[in-house]
Amino acid sequence: MSETPIIIKPEKRYTWEQWLAGRALRRNLGERVAPSVIRRTESSSDKRLREAFDGERGPEFVNPDGTARQ
Amino acid sequence: MISEETREALRRIESEKDASVKALLLAALVSGVFRQAGFAPVIVGGSAIEFYTDGAYMSGDVDICWSGPHLPGPADQARAMIACGAGPGGPRTWKVAGLFVDLLGAVETFATSDYASMDTPLGSVVLQPVEDLIVERVFAARCWTGPNAAAEDCARKLLATALAGGLTVDWLEVERIAALPAYDCIQSVQAMKKEVTAALAEEVP
């Protein structure tokens, strides 16, 4: 795996474990200020996205227990 | 020619059920292949916001721009994407592992603060500075063409994560970018930040 030539400060490097561990907190914070799912309903890519994802604009978002986010 | 390592990575991505994880792993795979070819990919827009927020915002495509003096030409892009197991999905777009990857132009950033990186089991991704994204989304929500509900929700989630979600954010830089003539939206940024701070301070029932 090659490293990026872009210089990244240590405080702006996030590990996989940090990212996974922070998911519940980020979702909770987001859902306190906006609806759970906020995917746009249209864009210039609509046609190809809806053809690829059974009429939706992307794959379903799921909760940690595998249920769909509403 | 697709390497066995890439095939294994593709199997992992294709079997992933979580949309955000799937997109992040795919972004890492594609970024690694382009880095090996000498380019510096940066994940931008809704995909970057998704990885910062887990906000259920992104659609089924990952947007990639380029930092540095070298942008991949069409032949470079084709070589790299074919090595990733991708097929063409439209102009500037490739389809791989059930998602789309949009290969765009040079990254546009007003931030002097740094890019962020996220490590994954399939390599790292570099993300557009969060300071840029905050200003861009607030501008789209409240200034660009008038109130925009979708951009408003996105900006509020990004601010909530930036304020309390463990991200490192240079707030002076956010205000500097917002005050630039390109955006001229510092009052909107300050107002929304205040609103989100107040919303987060409310007790959860």
Image (cartoon, grey):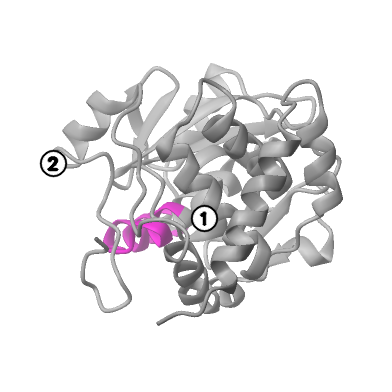
2 and 1 marks in contact (CB < 8 Å): no
Query: Dot 1 corresponds to which residue?
Result: B157
Which quadrant of the figure has residue B117? bottom right
Q: Give the magenta-colored segment's residue range.
A: B5-23
Amino acid type assigned to the residue bearing label 2 in the image: Asp
Left or right, residue A50 beside residue B53: left
Query: Dot 2 corresponds to which residue?
Result: A54
Measured as percent of width and height from the top left, residue B7 is found at 38, 55
Instruction: Please name whichever residue, B124 or B166, is drawn nearer the observer in this view of the structure.
Output: B166
Q: What residue is rendered at 35% in x and 38% in y?
A: A40
Which of the image's four quarters has the N terminus of chain B? top left
Q: What residue is rendered at 32% in x and 47% in y?
A: B97
> How far, Cα to Cα, is label 2 from label 1?
27 Å
Q: Main secondary structure of the magenta part?
A: helix
Secondary structure under badge 1? Answer: helix
Secondary structure under badge 2? Answer: loop
Which quadrant of the figure has residue A28? bottom left
State which mark lies toward you, 2 or 1.
1
Instruction: Please name whichever residue, B48 or B144, is drawn nearer the observer in this view of the structure.
Output: B144
In this view, B109 is above or below B50: above
Left or right, residue B10 beside residue B202: left
Measured as percent of width and height from the top left, residue B108 is found at 70, 28
Amino acid type assigned to the residue bearing label 1 in the image: Lys
**How crowded is the residue under tag 1: few (<14 C-alpha within 10 Å), some, or many (20+)?**
many
Q: Is residue B40 magenta?
A: no
